[in-house]
Image: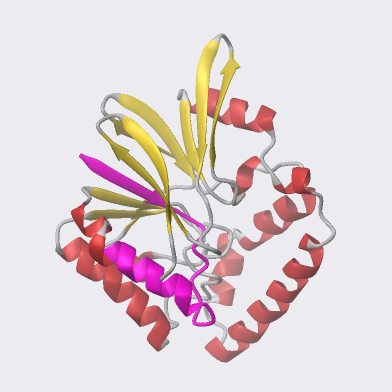
Amino acid sequence: MTILFISDLHLSPLRPDITDCFIDFMQNEAIHAEKLYVLGDLFEFWIGDDDNSPFNVSIKNEFKALTEKGVECYFIQGNRDFLLNKRFCKETGVELLDDHTVIELDGEKVLIMHGDTLCIDDIKYQEFRAKVHKPWLQWVFNRIPLFIRQRIVKNVQDKIKEKKQTKTLCIMDVTQSEVERVMQEEGVQRLIHGHTHRPDTHTFMSNNKEMTRIVLGDWYSQGSILEYSDKIYSLHKKEFK
């Protein structure tokens, strides 16, 4: 049994190298897996399931081809693609999961999530996240003409870039106490997430139990894949061609 996890690809027409790496991964690696979990930020920004640009359609076709071959695909929304919803899933065969989802791997309960909610020291971001996740606001946004949404998102992205330059690295990383609280609340000893772009495996003690937190990497300079097979977790890099 091989299960794959990816996150933080930030796919965009402006980065064909990332897109090519993703397509190669889907067609030559994911096709041999039993399941694929995408833990958010697949896209640089997803402005709605009705955005059928040629680029978006090409990405959806990769998922559709994979699910039609029998590979189960699951998706957790990230902070860049929180508007990805039911229509995308219907068109691709992908199943949308809750922000916090517990799966079972060979008898072990494992918590998977995007990871942005663990960064509670970044108060401004958490306030922004709470606003944009309001159902009524998303309902209104999705009914604004597509070209206006594109302008709004462009302005938001510019502001995000400006704010990132003034934030310290520790603020943008997870808060350890929140990691432990969430893991204890969900009753797990293993957590897999993305968002921070800091691929690594962290082991620590909490309430006299050994806990493990696996962080997925981003795809800015190479692909990053977590493979689970024969009860072993392995983080792999995938070089751009």
Residue 52 visible in the snapshot: no
Q: Is residue 149 visible?
A: yes
Does the magenta portion include 17? Answer: yes
Farthest right residue in view:
166
The residue located at (66%, 56%) in the rendering is 129
Which quadrant would the C terminus be assigned to in this image? bottom left
Residue 222: image x %, image y %?
Answer: 49, 61
Residue drawn where x is 55% and y is 61% of the image:
135
Question: Which picture quadrant has residue 128?
Answer: bottom right
Q: Reply above or below: 176 against 46.
A: above
Q: Residue 30 at x, y = what percent?
A: 27, 57
- What is the basis of the colouring in this image? secondary structure
Which of the 4 image quadrants contains residue 163? bottom right
Q: Which residues are drawn in magenta?
A: 1-26
Give coordinates of residue 141: x percent, y percent. 58, 75
Q: Nearer the viewer, residue 19 or 136?
A: 19
Extreme residue in the left direction: 69
The reply to whether the magenta stretch includes residue 126 is no
Looking at the image, which is closer to me, 140 or 19?
A: 19
Q: Tell me what residue is drawn at x 58 percent, y 75 percent.
A: 140
Residue drawn where x is 44% and y is 47% of the image? 98
Residue sticking out furthest to the top: 208
Is the N terminus in the top left, top right, bottom left or bottom right quadrant?
A: top left
Horizontal side, residue 5 vs residue 199: left or right: left
Count the labels in the image: 0
Q: Is residue 6 left or right of residue 209?
A: left
Q: Position of residue 11 (x, y in %)?
A: 48, 71
